[in-house]
Image: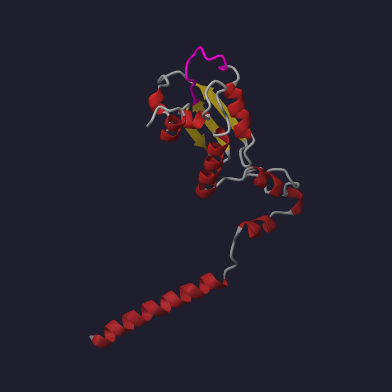
Amino acid sequence: MFWERKDEEQMATEMATEEDQRVAEQPQEGPEARLEAVPAAEQPAAGQPAADGPSTDVQAVAEQKMVNPVERLDLESRVQEALRLVYDPEIPVNIYELGLIYDLQVDDAGKVDVQMTLTAPSCPEAELIPGRVETAVKGVEGVTDANVELVWEPPWTPARMSEAAKLQLGILY
């Protein structure tokens, strides 16, 4: 019986080896091999998308560059630093430390969405500050687009200020 088991194992090994050899001998089919199989007359011109797929143009691929998670975090950090350069002219603290930025989202393509408020709806700078925020965000390298949304809910309160802002304004002792 021992010899029968060995024969079965040996046969299985030989069959697996033969299959490995067949696979190794077959030409590998990647995108380049498939493109070569298409007659030149049927291949799309440079920069034109194939009938059944996306463009193979290098420039088009570069324009659609996706940001990896580490780059996205770095970009978000640089956007936050840019927002720290925007001030409400009536208060000597930047809008980020004042807690006027409610939400900041950076997507994989480098588009930034900012949701912010102001200290009061009657703020005389209400029309100007969102534009300053958008300009500051768009000025950050890597940002492809910026959208700033001004919201009033929840209302801003001094509790939203950072400790540094409270200290600077003499609210925190």
Q: Which quadrant holds the C terminus?
A: top left
The residue at 58%/28% (across/down) is 133
The foreground one among 164 and 79 is: 164
How many badges with numbers are in the image?
0
Q: Is residue 44 magenta?
A: no
In the picture, residue 102 is in which quadrant? top left
Which residue lies most toward the top here? Answer: 122
**Location of residue 57 with respect to 119 vertically, above or below:** below
Image location (x, y in percent) of residue 60: 68, 44
The residue at 63%/33% (across/down) is 138
Image location (x, y in percent) of residue 48: 72, 43
Which residue lies most toward the left here? Answer: 1
Magenta stretch in the rendered image? 116-126
**Location of residue 4 with respect to 52 vertically, above or below:** below
The residue at 51%/75% (across/down) is 21
Image location (x, y in percent) of residue 121: 49, 14
Q: Which quadrant holds the N terminus?
A: bottom left
The foreground one among 8 and 156 is: 156
The residue at 48%/73% (across/down) is 20
The foreground one among 166 and 136 is: 166
Q: Is residue 50 visible?
A: no
In the picture, residue 39 is in which quadrant? bottom right
**Location of residue 4 with respect to 160 vertically, above or below:** below
Colour scheme of the picture: secondary structure
5 left or right, relative to 119 = left
Image location (x, y in percent) of residue 157: 40, 22
Q: Is residue 76 visible?
A: yes
The foreground one among 137 and 97 is: 97
Q: Main secondary structure of the magenta part?
A: loop
57 left or right, relative to 111 = right
